Image: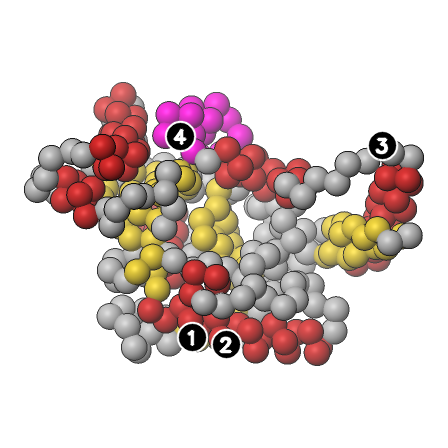
Amino acid sequence: MGKLDECRARSAVWLSRSKVRSAARLVIFGADCHSAHVNFPRFWAKGAHNGFECWRWSNASLNEAQSLAKEAARKLAERFAAGRERLNRYAYADRPLREPVLRELKNAAGDVAAVITRNSYGCLVINTARVMFVDVDLPEPKDSGDGFFKRLFGKAEVTVKDAPHSQALAKAAAWVKEYPNWAWRVYRTRAGFRLLATHALFDPDPAISDGAFDALGADPLYRQLCKMQKCFRARLTPKPWRCGVSNPPVRWPFPDAKAETRFKDWEIRYAKACAERATCELVTTIGHNPVHPDVQLVIAAHDEATRAESKLALA
């Protein structure tokens, strides 16, 4: 893998914000930058044997990835034939994610603070080895949520329907009360909340991260994925189906130029469909400690891409 400062963007697509209240624009770079700070292997290959297919990866070379993929497919076919293998469609978090690194965010010292990747269904995702995001899913709301936001700003009484939202915020406030050196930036998402710790940097593995995840009720699959990827993650752009767009027709790495063209055509449709949507909405901040400089860099990229202060519908 080449040096990080030698990574170069191969292409750029500007998502125009001219038709929405937020005038922000997000640059999407070509997929040829890969960071050693998070677990996104540069080389991927697919192997096949007797009808079974496997993807494998390498940070060294495409040849190594191809060799590993062929061997994995052969072993999978043999285990299945012997009745020793059960296919597990939910095993995504036991291996690195097959995502291209599109952009690196560097701090004042030139170190990579975060990378932006594209996930399997085409959304941009920010990944950071040391800036803590916590993903909290809540039960499906039974009303519009107006009661929750009125209560948040002191204009209404608590109702039973508001309870999951209120409890989530109460957990974050309780954490800061117990650990007053902490501070949170709290966002509403379509399915729940997203919290961003703003006062310091962290590691996804140690007990302090697990303690915060436990206290806040972090999504179990998100926790598992953080540990596997050795980073925290947050989706930046809307899910396609929430904008009336199908999933991408092909995934990276593209097998040929024709496949890549099909993806780029899809990407244009997706960008247009996202024009009137936000991914999350800034609700409040909890705690009053200074924001760490690296965290501020991530906040700026995150809030611009998600349109966190646009008041647009969430997707």
Q: Are marks 1 and 3 in contact (CB under 8 Å)?
A: no
Residue identifier under label 1: 272
Q: Which residue is mark 3?
A: 84
Q: Position of residue 304 (x, y in %)?
A: 34, 61
Of the image marks 4 and 1, the number of the one nearer the N terminus: 4
What distance separates the C-alpha of mark 2 from that of mark 1? 6 Å
Give the residue number, with chain letter if any, for mark 4: 217
Q: Which residues are magenta?
A: 202-218
In this rendering, is residue 229 above or below 273? above
Quarter of the picture holding the C terminus:
bottom left
Please tell me whether mark 2 sits on a helix, a strand or a loop. Answer: helix
Q: How many residues crowd around disc 3 within 10 Å: few (fewer than 14), some, or many (20 or more)?
A: few
Mark 4 Cα-neighbour bin, 10 Å: few <14, some 14–19, many ≥20 = some
Furthest residue to the left? 155
Quick check: marks 2 and 3 in contact, CB under 8 Å? no
At x 22% / y 32%, what residue is drawn?
Answer: 160
Q: Secondary structure at mark 4?
A: loop
Foreground: 34 or 235? 235
> What kind of residue is marked 2?
Ile
The answer to whether residue 176 of the structure is visible from this angle is no
- In percent of the image, x 36 and y 50: which residue is there? 190
Amino acid at dot 1: Lys
> Marks 3 and 4, Cα distance to the nearest angstrom?
35 Å
Check disc 2 and report the residue beneath it: 268
Determine the CA span between mark 1 and mark 3: 47 Å
Number of the front mark, 2 or 3: 3
Looking at the image, residue 253 sits to the left or right of residue 82; the answer is left
Q: Earlier in the sequence, mark 1 or mark 3?
A: 3
